[in-house]
Each structure stands twice: as structure tokens, then as C-alpha cells.
Image (tube, rainbow, N blue to C red):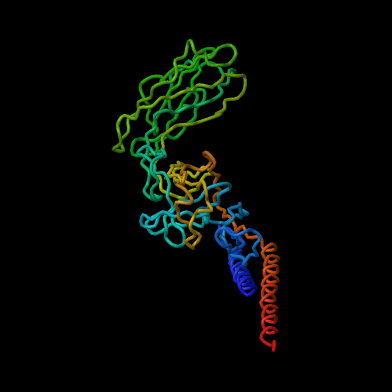
Amino acid sequence: MSFQQGLSGLNASARNLDVIGNNVANANTVGFKASSAVFADVYANALGGAGGAVGIGTTVAAVVQGFQQGNITATSNPLDLAINGDGFFRLSNNGAVTWTRNGQFQLDKDGYIVNVEGARVTGYPVGPTGQVVASTPADLQLSRADISPSATTAANVVVNMDSRKAAIAVPFNQTDPTTYSNATSQTVYDSLGNAHTLTMYFTKTAANTWDVRTAMDGTMIGAGATGTVTFDSSGAIDTAATTLPFSVSATVTTGATDPLVFDLDFTGSTQFGSAFGVNDLTQDGYASGRLTGFNISDDGTVMGRYSNGQSRAQGQVVLGTFNNPQGLQPLGGNQWAETAASGQPQVGAPKTGTLGALQSGAVEESNVDLTAELVGMITAQRVYQANAQTIKTQDSVMQTLVNLR
């Protein structure tokens, strides 16, 4: 049996060297997971025979992959994704679903996020309101369409009025700075996204009392004050005497919805004995915007950035885990397929459950330890030589028997 034992050892060692060689060859393959050969001894006993029989060699029982985390390296491509933790990217190729740890992605001509082989990354789509809808994963496609403008519905102005200013008794004149105490302006938008300049004039009419007048693109809004702000002795707005926000209704001639109606709020404004100052100007309208770039957050949300300063979710990358990842079938191209042994995938958004977080602009390197593989290669070579020596020795014994006279 020594021939059979030695032959099995040669075959097993050669298979082990194949596995090691494949690991070394993929030391620079992004997302690659190193494999190892698992050996088992072989016995041939007669049915009901006594134990203690000499084995007839070895066999490679399985080749298993180790799914330990690889090092994460930064790249210059925002679509490169690395998984920090458990999970696999879910890919679709004409409906056939595969799984990968290689996050080297790009956009194809139709705006789909794909790998180098053209398989599409899947995830949750967005609904009509721009919110991610956690439904059945679908192919993720980035839209390059402009986003619609939004008319201003609320504006907030935070200023400090100078309490040292004297009250003004003369009639207000927009063109005469001596008829008002201070002024400031901000941009607001109509329903077509056209920008308009809203100018606010502040006139102190009595102690702690200020009239606010407004103008749109140089044209006064209304015949009198838009509202009156009253402060208390501590310099804060007297909410009992002041009703906020003020309602502004301005005429627009751009073809947009007319009039442009929005709330003008001065909550947070003060009146102290210091110079007039503008602390904050905000409003919720914006013009139409074109896609200028995108980024992917650690929870997989793909956010588009637009020329008007807005951001919109365009989908969310999903991940999947398996109860037994060792049961996945390697397909090549850094992809695996689900099998009965792996169990069904548990699919969800990154950073939920046991799923890891994503890192944009980075990739996960191969988890091959070259030092360990080279040492294993030396060991496998020695084992191969030893098994060859076993066959050589058995051949010498057989030759001795043949030469008996």
C-alpha cells in the first residue's frame, strides 16, 4: 500500500501547492479571500473488521476560503467602496444575482453603477419625495436630470438693532438713508427658480420699537410697514407685543406664481447697545440645479450634489450576509453565488444588524498573507519530496523481492 499512500500524498501536496499558488497570484486582487486546503486521512477497513488498520493515505477534503477582513486602502474614485465589517455587495447581471467584496465600481453609459465586468450594483431606490424606499433591491442608476426649483416659503433674519439709535420721525423714503435706521438684503426664489433681492429697511420709531419695511428688486412691498418688532428691556424680542412671522406677498413678473408669498421671521434678533449687525440670513428656496458630483455615505446612501447647493439621495447600496459564507460557490471575477449550503442571504442597508459600514473612495485589499504563503509553499514542497521518497523506498523494496532467486 505504500505506493498508494505515497501517491495520495503527492496528489494532496500538489493540490495544496495549487491553492497556495492561487493565493500568491491574487495577492494584489482587490476583495480576494485566501483559500486553504483541508486534508483528511483515508482508511479501508473490511466490513465488521477490527480497528487499528494502517491508513491508505490522505486526500484533500475541501478547499475553504477565509473571509477575514483585508486592509482598506484609499483611492481617488468616489465610486470605489470598501466594506468595513461583514457583508457582500449584491450584483445583478441580467437578473442573475452574485455577491462580491470587490468594490471597484464605475458608471456605465446609462448611469448604472457597475463593476469592471458590467454587473450592476443593486440597492434601494428613492421615492417621489427623494427619500430612500427600503423595498426589493434594484439596479442603482444615477440620474443626471436637473432638480426642479423650489419657491421660498420661509425666510429667517437674525440681526442686532442698535439701541443707541435715535427714533426717526420723518416719513420713510426708500432712496433717502436718513429716513430709516439700517437696511440689509437677501436672495429669495420664485416658483421658476428665479432669484429676487429682498431688501429689508429697519426704522426705529420709538424706544424698543422698530418698523420693518420690505422691497422686492427695488420695488416696495405694500404701502406701509410689513411689521413691527418690539424688544423688551433685556434686548430680546417681546413676544407679547410682536407677532412673528410676518407674511410677505410680493409681485413677480417672471411668469412664476404671482404673488410670491412667504413668511419673514426675525426670531433670535436682539437690541443691544452695539452697532447694527446681521448674524444670520436663511431661506428655504432654491433655483434649479445640475448634477456636479456625488458621494456615498457609510450607510450606503448615494447623495447627488447639485450646482444650486442642494443634495438629493439617488439610492442606497445594500449588503448581504450568509449564515455559512464557506458554502458560497466561487465564480471567478471576485464573485460568489448563493448555494443551498450557504443559506439564503440576509439583505439590508450597511450599518444595520451585523452588516458593516461602507467607506467611499477606498477598496479592500486581498487578505493574502504573503509571508505565511511562502512558508506554506516551502512546507508543501518538503511534504511532496517526502512522499516521493516513500514511493522511491517502496520501489527499492519491490526491486529486492524481484531479485530473489
- How far across and how far down the image is residue 147, in percent? 38, 43
**Residue 167 against residue 189 in the figure, above or below:** above
- Count of picture labels: 0
To which quarter of the image does residue 9 belong? bottom right
To which quarter of the image does residue 43 belong? bottom right
Residue at coordinates 49% horizontally, 22% vertically from top-left? Answer: 266
To which quarter of the image does residue 283 belong? top left
State which quarter of the image contains the N terminus.
bottom right
Left or right, 171 with respect to 275, comes to left
Left or right, 6 with respect to 338, comes to right
Q: Which of 54 and 100 is in front in this view?
A: 54
Q: Which of 144 and 314 is in front in this view?
A: 314
State which quarter of the image contains the C terminus.
bottom right
Residue lying furthest bottom? 405
- How far across and how far down the image is residue 379, in percent? 70, 67
Q: Which of 293 and 99 is in front in this view?
A: 99
**Residue 111 against residue 395 in the figure, above or below:** above
Residue at coordinates 56% horizontally, 16% vertically from top-left? Answer: 236
- How far across and how far down the image is residue 21, in percent? 61, 68
